Image (spheres, grey):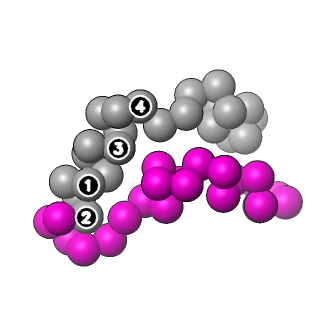
Amino acid sequence: MLREWHENFPPTEADIERNQQVADYQGSRNLFVDFPELADRISDF
């Protein structure tokens, strides 16, 4: 179910912008927003 959601709803421009704002504030990023293809490397997702 989570993988299907991930495939059907890729990160939007708003998600990417919010990810940058969070990174600017707290110094960490959501790698699944930066690199959505990482989800394909998780076998038990």
Q: Which residue is mark 4?
A: 12
* Comes first in the chain, label 4 or label 2: 4
Q: Please give the label number shown on residue 20.
A: 1
Residue 10 drawn at (x, y percent): 55, 33
Name which residue type carries label 4: Thr
Total marks in image: 4
Give yes or no for contact between labels 3 and 1 (Cβ–Cβ under 8 Å).
yes
- Numbered mark located on residue 35 in the image: none
Q: Mark 1: which amino acid?
A: Gln
Q: Residue at x 31, y 52 (%)?
A: 19
- Residue reaching furthest to the right: 43
Q: CA distance from mark 3 to mark 1?
A: 6 Å
Q: Residue at x 73, y 32 (%)?
A: 4
Residue type at mark 3? Ile
Q: Secondary structure at mark 1?
A: helix
- Mark 3 lies on a secondary structure that is helix
Circle 1 crowding by C-alpha within 10 Å: few under 14, some 14–19, many from 20: some
Height in image: 27 above or below 14? below
Please state which amino acid type lies under the numbered disc 2.
Ala
Residue 17: name its quadrant: top left
Report how far apart the C-alphas of labels 2 and 1 lie in the structure: 5 Å
Q: Residue furthest top?
A: 8
Labels 4 and 3 touching (C-beta < 8 A) = yes
Whether label 4 touches label 1, CB < 8 Å:
no
- The residue that mark 3 highlights is 16
Q: Which element carries disc 2, helix, strand or loop?
A: helix
Magenta residues span 24-45
Mark 3 Cα-neighbour bin, 10 Å: few <14, some 14–19, many ≥20: some
Quadrant showing the N terminus: top right
Q: Say which residue label 2 marks.
A: 23
**Dots 2, 1 in contact, CB < 8 A:** yes
The CA span between labels 4 and 3 is 6 Å
